[in-house]
Amino acid sequence: MIYRLIVLIIKELIQFFRDKGLLLFVLYLFTGDLYIAARGIDLTLKNAKFYVIDEDMSYLSRELISKFQKPTFEFMGYLSGLKTAERYMFEDKCVGIITIPKDFEKKILSKSDNYVGIIVNGTESSSSYLFAGYAANIISKFSLEKSFHINVKKLPIVNLQQKVLYNQNMDSHIFMTITELFSVITLLILILPASAIIKEKENGNIEMMLVSPVKISEFMIAKVIAMNVIIVLGVIISTILIIKGLLKIPFQGSFILFTLLTTLYVFTSSGISMFIASVANNMLQVSQITIMLLLPILYLSGSWAPVESMPYIFQKLTYLSPLKYYLEGSFSIILKGLDFTYVYKYFLGTFLLGVPVFVFGAYFLKRKI
């Protein structure tokens, strides 16, 4: 039986490498897709266009505007009033508009209350949110600096010192690249074993297999092992050549530990792919069901949005996403450099959730065949 299983696995691997379309698809996901995610997507604010309505036109108001510098901001000029500002917003000419009232400088010098307005374009919600946060921070710092230098001489000074752990530069490219790798792995887990089984159905090989000495369980195990070996090898190669080599993303923890967690996640989650194969009748249905299942798995993992910001019911449903445990464990290994004594709970979560999924998937597929 072991010999027959090994022969079947080798046959599946050869069949995969002969399928040039599928081979190019997998190669692209582990190389080009990761590179685009690393270089093409930036979550920080860059070149945010803004105008200013300055009713004071004083030295301090101009000094405040000079604090909004490139590459974060791009100053487009002064506007005459709110009507012009509304028109510019309708035409999407800027992300935000800063309004400075009359007597701005006079009120600062006389210790009076002062107001600066920030108008943002809500249709670009992410950029507007970042613009408002960055602008509010600059205005607050400017106000404190001027208040201190002008009015106060002897007050206790609080020096704020920030220390960022694990990703010192808070580089969003690191998060995007690793998250994209996890999404690619999950996509391939869902689609590769299922497509390998459905191709046999479409070619009429299932009936031939039923009258051959090959058992159904051997047929299923060979498909799953061969496709999962390809996924794990793809993760290892892309991590070494693309993530660590080309993109220079730091890998703080044990690569072997990360590979073991990846292998556990890939094999246990492949039960979902077997379930897809049991439901689908052709490759089109495999693609449709894969997309239908992939989106909630990604969303509930916390890779798209923090779990804490989700509605209560969705926060509880995240515990049913195998990707959640794999994602948190892998981030702990890659960025924090934690060892097994700290990440064993993610191994346990992946195993406990994955084994029933694998068993149910194999059960449904065996019944369908």
Image (spheres, rainbow, N blue to C red):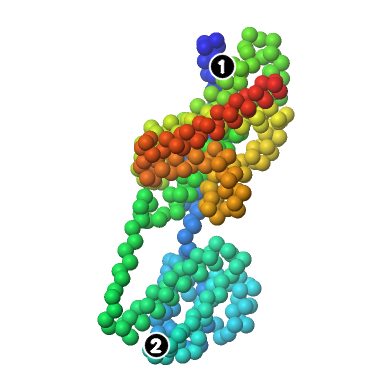
Lower position in the chain sequence, tag 2 or tag 1: 1
Instruction: Give coordinates of residue 163: x percent, y percent.
Output: 33, 58
Q: Residues within 10 Å of mark 2 (few under 14, many from 20)?
A: few
Which of discs 2 and 1 lies nearer the camera? The answer is 2
Residue sitting at the far top: 213
Tag 1, which secondary structure?
A: helix
Q: Residue at x 52, y 76 (%)?
A: 118
Give the residue at x 50% y 68%: 131
Q: Does the rendering let one see residue 182?
A: no
Give residue 94's quadrant in the image: bottom right
**Labelled disc at residue 8:** 1
Q: Position of residue 321 (x, y in %)?
A: 57, 40
Task: Answer with the quarter of the image where residue 330 lies.
Answer: top left
- Name the residue carrying label 2: 111
Q: Residue at x 54, y 67 (%)?
A: 128
Answer with the quarter of the image where residue 186 lies.
Answer: top right
Q: Amino acid at mark 2?
A: Lys
Question: As shown in the figure, which amino acid type bears the numbered disc 1?
Answer: Leu
Where 227 falls versus 108 (above or below)?
A: above
| Horizontal side of residue 367 vs 167, given as left or right | right
Quote the CA–CA distance across marks 2 and 1. 82 Å
The quarter of the picture where the C terminus appears is: top right
